[in-house]
Amino acid sequence: MNHARTAFALATLVASTAVALSPVAQAKPWEDDEEPMPTHTATATVASTSFAGMFGLPSLSLALRAPDPKVRAAAVLRAAEVASTAKEAPARDEAWRMVEGAALDGGDDLDGALRVRLAAARALAADPRREGRSALETLLASPEPPRKVVAPPPTWGGGWGGPGPWGGPGPWGPAPMPPPKVIKPASPELVRFVRETAAMALGARGDHETLLIRARSRDNVESSRAALGALAAYPPVSLGPILPKGESGFARDTVELLVRLGDPRAADPLLRVCAGTDDQNAAIAVVGLSRLGDGRVVNVARAVTKESRAELRIAAAEALAELGEPSGETAILALLATPATKGEAARLAVRHPTAGLVPMLYEFARAGDLPAIGALGRAGEPGTPKLEALARDEALPPGVADVAAHQLAISPLDGAGKALAGMLDGASPARRRRAVHAGAVRAARIGSVPGALISAAKELSSAKAPEDRAAGTLLLSVDDLGRARRALASDDVVVRRAGVAALGAHPVTDAAAVARDHLDAHAAIEPPDVVQALAAVAARAVDGSVARDVPLSTTQLATWLSEDGPAAPLAAFLLAARGGDTARAHGARALGASSIDVRVAALLGLGLSPDPSATGELGARLSDAPNATLRRAAMRALVARGDGASTRAILAAKRLDPDAEVRALAAAAKAGVRGSPLIFGHEVAQAKVTGASAAVATIAAADGLLLPVGVGPDGFVVAFRVAPGGARLDVLPALAAPLASPTGPAKASKP
């Protein structure tokens, strides 16, 4: 009888599992017999029409004890659905208890157990019972299942001769005991994801008191950070639970929490802190008020004297500078006069440059402080002469002159353009190239270039030295798309490389068309780095069909992917966008790659894929990936697809994803509106790599897509139309030996 019952239950579980995994069947085109499966697969779900739903709660109870964590996670979601829709209270309570129990799932596969706990945390966000709060509090405090050591079963008796007469070893000695099996530790990233999701679920339930208590706790930094993130997403109704009662003073952790919350309602309590006798608390409160933009802190900061504690004087100077008060400059200079606060004065001067701070910043810049050069650029007209002096001086530490020239290039001031032209007077070859390079950046960023720089570029474009030809061609090709086309038709590969680099400065659709045409005609004879850079230009087209139709074979892209070189993310992006059985198989491999950059690129590519199943794949990755960078890419791709089928996944992420950027992307989604998963801007990223004549580089902007860019013969790297938000630049070994130049063979050097 028991055997028959077990067989019946297992048959039910198998049927439930088959239906639970039915969404994965939609993603079948992503699989291939000859290709490895991706690391992350679609999350199993138990639909309401599954056998689990038909057989009711007993089947779900059985599924929650299944060895496969995907089945257990699917059962959790189905139990939550039953709990939300069941008409009878006992059934609802029993289903919620199942979900609550799953929050403590302790399977041998710790990562699998964490995914079950993750499903429970998301489900408990909708649990109206108080018991659900307790389970989420446990996950917030300690989401990781205990690490297990599985001991082998005892071996009875001895060796071949059997047990001895008194139960001791046999004649051949005791049987060998296998070593205990140690379960591998859980992924820290997944532990953090579960913790942060539990915090978001508490916020969605309105359990702010729990979050406020946890956020001010110092014994568990990870829990405190997760609670703070949830409070930012779900601001509390009142700050009363953390404020002191009566006339008692503020504890340090309370003041820190009020500042970290960034809630305008914290302004009045922080002003009370400023009026207290604790200077350290007052320093924290002053900075917090300035970040809130509360002008009442100005009088508090002005009242700070030179006899006050250093922490309070630093905070007062920061508050005044943050709010744009003229007295902030005086306060920073006062800090500079004291050795103990000189470092803080430098930090504040770089963050809040003014005309009076320019001499200080100039001295820092001459010593090689590159952030100070950027501050001179933000200081306006007073900083321009100092930047020109830095850009002219060849004796300064490496990089100073190049960064100064770049700051002049991106400055909208007329004086900055004149300063670049002035660099040509009596210039050395290196300074002349530096000025022309900066002119190319100015042409792309500002749109106007002094005529003297154009004339210098024309001279350099026909010079013997490859460094000169590259610099001159770059400026002329940035200024004129027709000139960029002619550069691509040159017999000189140095000129062609400069023409490819300049394409990025032109409108993305026009540049992509030029790159595609050149690839179609000359991909077979161009050096690998040129082919890859052209493919990168074509890939960034706004129109997804252009990216899908880049004229490179699937075999070529698969080779780049397998080489795991600088073009591997580009190949993953194009393969995922292309569609078709073969490309999809390689795209699945990219989704399971060890490199985050490759996986991000493949996810972004799915945003352009013509395959309808890409939406389900992206939704599963959005739900499943503990890495926030991967979830951002999946969300960008889902939003770009504009597919109504993704609405549920997007809404769930908008409500419970711990990452603020993912939630912001979800909030901006518009069903039925297709777009690009990539971000375009008007910034220019530039670097100078010393001795990098045989190097290639990759750059990733805010969208996360890592693309190859060329490195000029003199080590200049430039990328145009970069979105705001910073960029990451990596220099890698060359794809091929450097080509010969008219002045003799070029010598490779380490980047």
Image (cartoon, grey):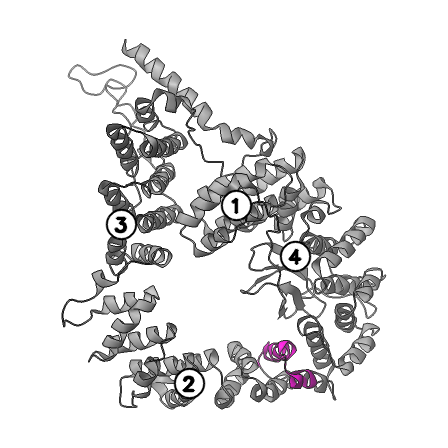
Give the residue number, with chain letter if any, for mark 4. 708
Residue type indicated by callout 3:
Ala
Residue 141, labelled with which disc? 3
| Range covered by the magenta-colored residues | 397-419
Q: How many residues crowd around disc 1 within 10 Å: few (fewer than 14), some, or many (20 or more)?
A: few
Q: In which quarter of the image is residue 65?
A: top left
Left/right of residue 744 with respect to residue 54 in the rendered view: right
Residue type indicated by callout 4:
Pro
Disc with the residue nearer the chain's start (2 vs 4)? 2
Residue type indicated by callout 2:
Glu
x then y, percent, for residue 617? 53, 38
SS state under label 1: loop
SS state under label 4: strand
Separation of residues labelled 2 and 4 (CA atoms): 44 Å
Left/right of residue 68 with respect to residue 173 in the rendered view: right
SS state under label 3: helix
Q: Is residue 553 above or below residue 629?
A: above
Give the residue number, with chain letter if any, for mark 1. 594
Tally the marks: 4
Asked if residue 569 can be seen in this view, the reply is yes
Mark 2, mark 1: which one is toward the viewer? 2
Q: Are marks 3 and 2 in contact (CB under 8 Å)?
A: no
Give the residue number, with chain letter if any, for mark 2. 325
Mark 1, mark 3: which one is toward the viewer? 3
Q: How many residues crowd around disc 3 within 10 Å: few (fewer than 14), some, or many (20 or more)?
A: some
